[in-house]
Image (tube, rainbow, N blue to C red):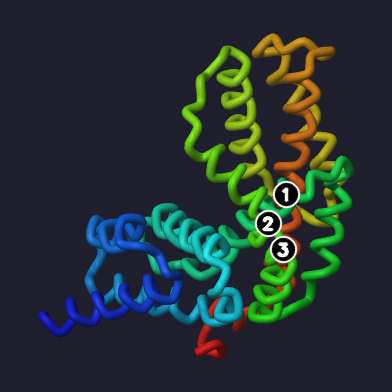
Amino acid sequence: MDDVYSSLGYHLRIVQEFLSIPNERFKLKMILYALSISIEDKITILEKIKAFLIPFSMFRDIQEFMNSTYDYIQKTIEITGGSLNEFVRILIRTILMGFIQEYVDYVRLYKREEVFDYLTRALGKLSLTPLIINLGLLLKPMYRDKEYIESRKQLQQVEVEYTIDSEVETMIKGAIDGWIESQELNLDKQDELRERLSIEFKNLIEIYNVPKESELYKKLHIEVMEMLSLKLTVLSLMDSLHDDSFRLDSMT
């Protein structure tokens, strides 16, 4: 049994050292120990994470990139509850959704739909390793932009004061997120999905009494449509991956 715990500690150290996460920020040990799964399964999760991290080697010198990667790994373990079933698929989806959303926020373009289309064209039909490398190269300037990184840190440190508008915004976006998750997403029926989303959005706007001429309405309308676009972009990229991309054995 001591050998098993020693192996768990070894794999944890490898992941921590690869990502250069300081002890006070590295919570994987605590999270894994809280899971009601066997030590062997915990080691398997870490082995899958180690294999998944191999294509990220060329970005190890960009610490903010590694920090975000760690955050998405931690989020995946929390989402899956330690279940090995579909763990890698959910890890890839979480990473893609997180990084793509960060990139879209960073470029701050008005026509964000074009950004999603561009990402689908640029990253589609790639196997997992080149997909990660190409996405990383796209993100590299963002993570080296000191002004952006500083503004993001400040935003994370600010205590959010909830106004009535922000509470309504949270409720509507939460409802929309649940609605999108409940839909059978189909890339061939994107227009139909957007029409149905518009109807659902209008229903929620009426329920929460948000005036259609208000800035909140305009902001929410853009953001909920973007939520669907993000899901469809990630679905497209996931569909383009070969089945062996989710095994990771070709990366080890």
Residues at marks 2 and 1, CA–CA distance in whole angstroms: 10 Å
Tags 3 and 2 touching, CB below 8 Å: yes
**Location of mark 2 (residue):** 145
Does residue 94 appear left or right of residue 204 in this picture? left
Q: Nearer the viewer, residue 214 or 245?
A: 214
Residues at badges 2 and 1 in contact (C-beta under 8 Å)?
yes
Type of amino acid under label 1: Tyr
Give the residue type at disc 2: Asp
**Position of 66 relative to 156 (above/below):** below
Dot placed on the residue nearer the N-terminal end, 1 or 3: 1
Side of 198 relative to 66 (left or right) = right
Label 2, secondary structure: give it: loop
Please name which of the two marks, 2 or 1, marks the residue nearer to the observer. 2
| Picture quadrant of residue 242 | bottom right
Question: Gap between marks 1 and 3, in whole Å?
Answer: 10 Å
Location of residue 196 (image quadrant): top right
Which residue is painted at 72% across and 17% down in the image? 205
Q: Quadrant of residue 174?
A: top right
Q: Is residue 93 above or below residue 133?
A: above
Question: Real-space Cα distance between discs 3 and 2?
Answer: 6 Å
Q: Looking at the image, which residue is at 86% across and 57% down? A: 117
Kindly identify the amino acid type of the residue bearing the numbered disc 3.
Pro
Looking at the image, which residue is at 15% across and 84% down?
Answer: 3
State the quadrant of the N terminus: bottom left
Residue occupied by mark 3: 141
Q: Mark 2 Cα within 10 Å, few/some/many (few <14, many 20+)?
A: few
